Image (cartoon, coloured by chain):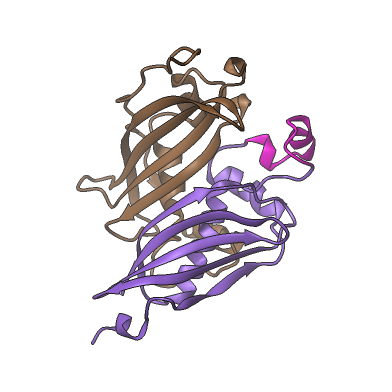
């Protein structure tokens, strides 16, 4: 019997919530990514490009939120793979909720569907992952 | 027959890097905090470093990749998708290097964007001292070709 045997297809993973996406984090990530794209740093640039009136979260941060959800749901386990599609932007101040559902369990490998939703605009990132117990 | 020129032929362009990327404990802690979690206590780094390490240490900058595709980074490349397969977990303090290449650049008509190029590239992260990749990642970017939109 493996640890994964207690998890079944259809199991809903506990959500991971970011109450308010932070522009300070975007500033930090522009350093982590060595990519000072101003749409993540300067509201006036975002407005000038017709992309809205709030700074835009870097895409990889949104993936990190989903990874955090997985790591909290499966403590001590390892992410083997993750694939995600970027469907819409996440903006400063958004409330973001990462969630998922187990789709299959095979031996010590658990497959999941993932998504990241923001209040009022629905799913902005969606994908799949496999976890190794 | 499409009424726009083909995308530049860039498939196979090397993205091998020469830089060494090391995940510092301080940066890993700051990154974890910025995403709402504490750093792991077992020496593993946040797995999102798959994206950061490969982007920072690949052989071209983001702007450079765009330039190879004859696209101005100022015109707003967009992430389409990202996938990764981990062979090993990423470790704080480990030195890594990157190999990789552009897989394809495909020009398409889009209802939303007019004409766009879809760029797919693959990067691998290796221990700097050599050896098999600890991960492989495929990223897809969308490059809107405003100048070709009718």
User: Quadrant location of residue B56?
Assistant: top left
Which tint was used for chain B? brown
Q: Is residue A19 left or right of residue B114?
A: right
Nearer to the camera, B121 or A107: A107
Residue B61 location (% of width, % of height)? 47, 30
Give percent across and percent down for residue A55: 72, 45
Residue at 72% from the left image edge and 52% from the top image edge: A92
Residue B11 in which image quadrant: top left
- Residue name at image x 31 percent, y 35 percent: B100
Which image quarter holds the N terminus of chain B? top left
Q: Nearer the viewer, residue B112 or B49?
A: B112
Q: From where the camera sits, is residue B23 visible? A: no
Considering the image in quadrants, where does the C terminus of chain B appear?
A: top right
Looking at the picture, does residue A33 appear above or below residue A12? above
The image shows residue B134 at horizontal and vertical percentages of 28, 52
> Residues in magenta?
A37-52
Give the number of marks.
0
The residue drawn where x is 44% and y is 78% is: A11
Asked whether, in this view, residue A52 is left or right of residue B88, the answer is right
Q: Which chain is purple?
A: A
Confirm whether residue B116 shows in the render.
Answer: yes
Is residue A47 toward the left or the right of residue B104 in the image?
right
Residue furthest left in the image:
B131
Location of residue B119 (image quadrant): top left
Q: x%, y% of residue A10?
A: 43, 76
- Asked if residue A45 lies in the magenta stretch, the reply is yes
- Judged left or right of residue A21, residue B10 is left
Is B14 located above or below residue A132 in the figure?
A: above
Q: Is residue B141 above or below residue B42?
A: above
Q: Nearer the viewer, residue B144 or B114?
A: B114
């Amino acid at each position: 019997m493996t640890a994964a045997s207690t998890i079944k297809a259809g199991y809903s993973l506990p959500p991971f919530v970011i109450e308010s996406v932070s522009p300070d984090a975007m500033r930090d990530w522009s350093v982590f990514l060595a990519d000072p794209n101003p749409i993540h740093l300067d509201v006036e640039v975002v407005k000038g490009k017709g992309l809205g009136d709030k700074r835009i979260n870097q895409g990889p941060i949104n993936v990190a939120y989903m990874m955090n959800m997985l790591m909290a749901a499966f403590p001590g386990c390892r992410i083997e793979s993750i694939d995600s599609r970027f469907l819409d932007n996440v903006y400063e101040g958004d409330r973001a909720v990462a969630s998922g559902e187990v789709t299959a369990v095979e031996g010590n490998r658990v497959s999941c569907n993932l998504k990241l939703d923001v209040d009022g605009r629905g799913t902005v990132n969606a994908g799949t992952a496999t976890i190794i117990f | 027959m499409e009424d726009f020129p083909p995308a530049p032929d860039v498939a196979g362009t090397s993205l091998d890097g020469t830089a060494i990327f090391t995940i510092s404990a301080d940066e890993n802690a700051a990154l974890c905090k910025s995403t709402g979690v504490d750093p792991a206590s077992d020496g593993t780094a946040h797995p999102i470093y798959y994206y950061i390490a490969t982007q920072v240490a690949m052989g071209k900058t983001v702007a450079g990749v765009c330039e190879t595709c004859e696209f101005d980074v100022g015109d707003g490349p967009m992430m389409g998708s990202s996938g990764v397969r981990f062979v090993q977990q990423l470790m704080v303090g480990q030195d890594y290097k990157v190999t990789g290449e552009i897989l394809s650049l495909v020009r398409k008509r889009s209802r939303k964007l007019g004409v766009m190029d879809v760029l797919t590239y693959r990067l691998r992260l290796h221990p700097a001292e050599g050896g098999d990749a600890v991960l492989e990642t495929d990223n897809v970017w969308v490059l809107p070709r405003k100048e070709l939109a009718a």
